[in-house]
């Protein structure tokens, strides 16, 4: 079973499918969850080499303005964000979630830290 198939069967995938089915993207433009997942994966994978360590990126930034503008209304953007979040959680893409102090706002992703530094060293005497 592919990662996309696993996504479609997950609760996140079902939420994304419902969003698309109830929007113009799904009803008129016939955008399926499978197509959206593949498009987001391609866009995020293409963006990864250009990311700067320590930078924070939203799904809109990772997908790019041209692609993002094509998803009219909120449904496409929300469904794309659900796809990106699932890809990050299942380690399809190498990103970590940036956690704000309040935990509010749009989800932002970062490259995983390459070198983890130790702040304290415990020395036994």
Image (spheres, rainbow, N blue to C red):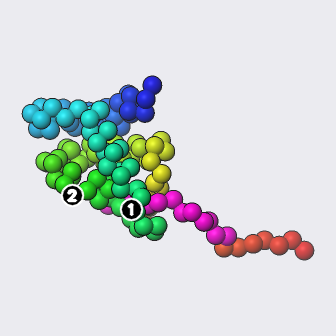
Q: Is residue 63 above or below residue 9?
A: below
Residue 65 image offset from top left, x and y in percent:
21, 58
Q: Residue at x 38, y 28 (%)?
A: 5
Mark 1, residue position: 50
The one nearer the camera, 43 or 27, is: 43
Q: Earlier in the sequence, mark 1 or mark 2?
A: 1
Q: Residue 85: which numbered mark, if any?
A: none
At horizontal 43% and vertical 33% (from top left) the residue drawn is 3
| Residues drawn in magenta | 103-118
Which residue is nearer to you in this view: 120 or 117? 117
Cα separation between marks 1 and 2? 15 Å
Q: Is residue 12 above or below residue 71?
A: above
Give residue 65's mark.
2
**Mark 2 crowd level (few <14, some 14–19, many ≥20, 10 Å Cα):** few
Please tell me whether residue 41 belongs to the stretch shown in magenta: no
Query: In the drawing, does residue 18 fall left or right of residue 52?
Result: left
Question: Are the residues flagged by discs 1 and 2 in contact, CB closer than 8 Å?
Answer: no
């Amino acid at each position: 079973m592919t990662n996309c198939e696993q996504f479609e069967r997950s609760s996140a995938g079902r939420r994304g499918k419902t969003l698309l089915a109830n929007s113009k993207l799904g009803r008129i433009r016939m955008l399926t969850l499978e197509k959206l997942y593949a498009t987001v994966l391609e866009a995020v994978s293409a963006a990864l080499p250009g990311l700067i360590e320590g930078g924070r990126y939203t799904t809109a930034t990772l997908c790019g303005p041209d692609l993002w503008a094509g998803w009219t209304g909120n449904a496409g953007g929300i469904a794309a964000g659900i796809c990106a979040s699932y890809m990050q959680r299942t380690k399809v893409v190498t990103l970590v979630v940036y956690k704000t102090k309040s935990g509010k706002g749009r989800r932002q992703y970062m490259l995983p830290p390459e070198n983890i530094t130790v702040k304290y060293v415990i020395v036994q005497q």
